[in-house]
Amino acid sequence: MSSAYQVIARKWRPQTFADVVGQDHVVRTLKNAISRNRIAHAYLFVGPRGTGKTSTARIFAKALNCTDGPNAEFDVNDPIVKSIGDGSSLDVIEIDGASNNSVEQIRELRDDVRYAPTQGKYKVYIIDEVHMLSNQAFNALLKTLEEPPEHVKFVFATTDVQKVLPTILSRCQRFDLRPIPADLIVGRLQQIAVEEKIKISTGALACIARMADGGLRDAQSIFDQMISFCGAEITEPDVLDVYGLVATEKVALLGGATARGDHQQMVAIVDECDAAGRDLVRLLSDLQAHVRTALLDAIAQGGSTTVLGNVVMTTEQVTRLLDALREGEGGVKLGLAEKINFEVTLLKAVEASRSRAIDSLIKELAALAESMPPGDAGDSEKKKD
């Protein structure tokens, strides 16, 4: 009988520190803490969804409780490590903060920490979405968190650290997991594609990475869905059609038309994308990312850029263009007439990029006045008399 199907995001979940993608600063610190026997009693992993918070917490628990541990380079075939990986270990307790957030449940946890681990060296409590705990639950946890038994370690994960009480933060070592760069997501998906015997184009991988917004789990889920849709061969047009994306070249074309103020081409591109069923909200987001690239280039080049096509734009112009696109985002997302709001946003962005700031005009006039010879200024005064 064939084994049950497992989605890619679970099948290819990181199992060791070497598998963690894009979080080298976190991995290095944890491995050094283990090798130097400087293991804290509480850790807090902060970051966007799909960046590896819970996976890293599990790997850390494996390193602490493996046979002859703590050991950062543990054997993946170790029975204790396997039990932690499949969730059957009695010493690694995972708690969902969203559904176990009452003070009574935290009091039960506080009572349980007194009991020694059964197999490993430590009892590790992993609380996901810890910001969902109530204030009363946080307060019930404080004393235990400050002075836990020697055999207990806490690992918290959250996507919204602002909601975590400062008294909890001060008792934890905090690690900020970053959004994973697109090139690392592409590299990881390529590895998975080779192992899964899937042929996928570079353009398709780039599209998936763009949609994932720094989350590897999201990228794996999208990849999984594309396999269901396309089978063993995936191309860029397939991804664009399924998710309503606009090709990178088309985004650049729209950016160039907006920079030049070519209203006809702007409207034509929007009409074409709308007729093809493309996601205009996503198109606006991609356009903002493209304009931001131009802004960074203008800063690097000392004040101007040609990234937005065959037109030279100053840093001020690109900044105004980007700001206008950002201001129109709410109307495109929430407005009833998405297409009209998108077109109006583009037109306003053109006008904003062509306007000049009053303070910059004053500076230019002042500079011109200072550059005038003293005689010219005197003559002008005499004429007034």
Image (cartoon, helix red, strand yellow):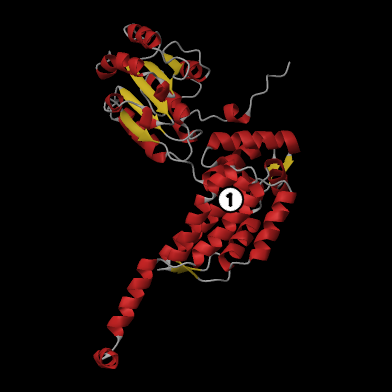
Observer able to see residue 66: no
| Position above or below: 303 against 157 | below
Query: Could you tell me which residue is drawn at 50 percent across and 64 percent down?
Result: 353
In the picture, residue 146 is in which quadrant? top left
| Position above or below: 208 against 141 | below
| Position above or below: 311 against 62 | below
Q: Position of residue 180 (x, y in %)?
A: 49, 42
Q: Position of residue 228 (x, y in %)?
A: 72, 33
Q: Position of residue 369 (x, y in %)?
A: 30, 82
Query: Could you tell me which residue is drawn at 53 percent across and 64 percent down?
Result: 351
Observer-nearest of 352 and 190:
352
Residue that mark 1 sits on? 284
Q: Residues within 10 Å of mark 1 (few under 14, many from 20)?
A: many
Observer able to see residue 340: yes
Q: Position of residue 311 (x, y in %)?
A: 55, 71
In the picture, residue 109 is in which quadrant? top left
Observer-nearest of 225 and 167:
167
In the image, 265: left or right of 93?
A: right
- What secondary structure is marked by label 1? helix
Which quadrant, please, contains the N terminus?
Answer: top right
Q: Amino acid at mark 1?
A: Leu
In the image, 55: left or right of 40?
A: right
Furthest residue in direction front, as rendered: 385
Which quadrant, please, contains the C terminus?
Answer: bottom left
| Position above or below: 168 against 253 | above
